[in-house]
Amino acid sequence: MLCVGLDSDFDKMPPHVKAMADDAGIAVRGEFFKGKPRSVIAFNKAIIDATAPFCIAFKPNLAFYECYGNAGLKALEVTVDYIRSNYPDLFIIADAKRGDIGNTAAMYARTFFDVMDFDAVTISPYMGTETVLPFLEYEGKFVITVALSSNTSASDFQFFNCDGKPLYRNVMEKMMSISTPDNMMFVIGATKAGQLAGIREFCPDNFFLVPGVGAQGGSAGDVIKYGSNSMGGLIINSSRAVIFASHGEDYATAAASAASHTANI
């Protein structure tokens, strides 16, 4: 059930990987990479190779690539291509949390599904169903709607009482009405494991992407206990606790160990 989040923060990388940013650079897929994107590519390849035996998915967070402009987005493309070429059976999620009106949403869908070849993309549904519908037009692709997130300020909005139900439940039920379990998943934070059993009662069939295991304090064991269904039904994400398990030259080995531990809970 493990998903490894590729939140590849240059500042947290081991010193010898950061030093690659000062190298002459490398040519990949006809593009020349130097500076921080050079380090990101090297770091990602090592993490992917080390953790692929223990996971079912990888989840690059767009923020850690967009911050480097065009070179960062190219590094993201290289990362996705590397997974596709070397681990074709693994699921790839764009953690983008996009959410805009229909014509703009259609362009985002084209970006992530046609151009960048992701299997799924996270969506923020605040602007309504039109932010989601264009993504549902792609056969074999998934929308992952943010419903109940793992961050501490999630309660600012997500637990608002709406007609006797928390807002996140209203969001989920609306999304379920326009989709099927074959194209819709939901983000349910691991730090909200106490709600998982109740959520499974009204949402028995959809998969949940569950962030918050590891650095944010969520328990994979609790998530599995309360959130599983007959198909498993969970993609449990761990980012920092896996990819930054060590800041030394053994970082890839340490990531493999952390991934193996989490996958076998």
Image (spheres, rainbow, N blue to C red):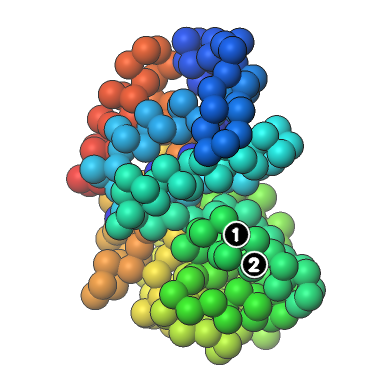
Q: Residue at x 57, y 36 (%)?
A: 30
> Which residue is under mark 2?
110
Residue 128 visible in the shown view: no
Please say if the residues under marks 2 and 1 sit with CB atoms less than 8 Å apart. Answer: yes
Q: Residue at x 39, y 57 (%)?
A: 91
Amino acid bearing label 1: Val
> Which residue is under mark 1?
115
- Splitting the image into 4 quarters, where does residue 228 fall? bottom left
Q: Residues within 10 Å of mark 2 (few under 14, many from 20)?
A: some
Q: Is residue 167 left or right of residue 20?
A: right
Residue farthest bottom in this picture = 177
| Residue placed most toward the observer, 250 or 209 | 250
Q: Please state, as top left, top right, bottom left or bottom right, where the N terminus lies in the image.
A: bottom left
Alpha-carbon span between mark 2 and mark 1: 6 Å
Q: Earlier in the sequence, mark 2 or mark 1?
A: 2
Amino acid bearing label 2: Arg
SS class, disc 1: helix
Residue 25 percent coordinates (x, y): 57, 18
Residue farthest left in this picture = 264
SS class, disc 2: helix
Residue 11 percent coordinates (x, y): 60, 20
Q: Residue at x 64, y 80 (%)?
A: 133
| Residue placed most toward the observer, 138 or 248 | 138
Residue 136 visible in the shown view: yes
Residue 243 to residue 159: above or below: above
Residue 174 to residue 257: above or below: below
Q: Residue at x 20, y 45 (%)?
A: 264
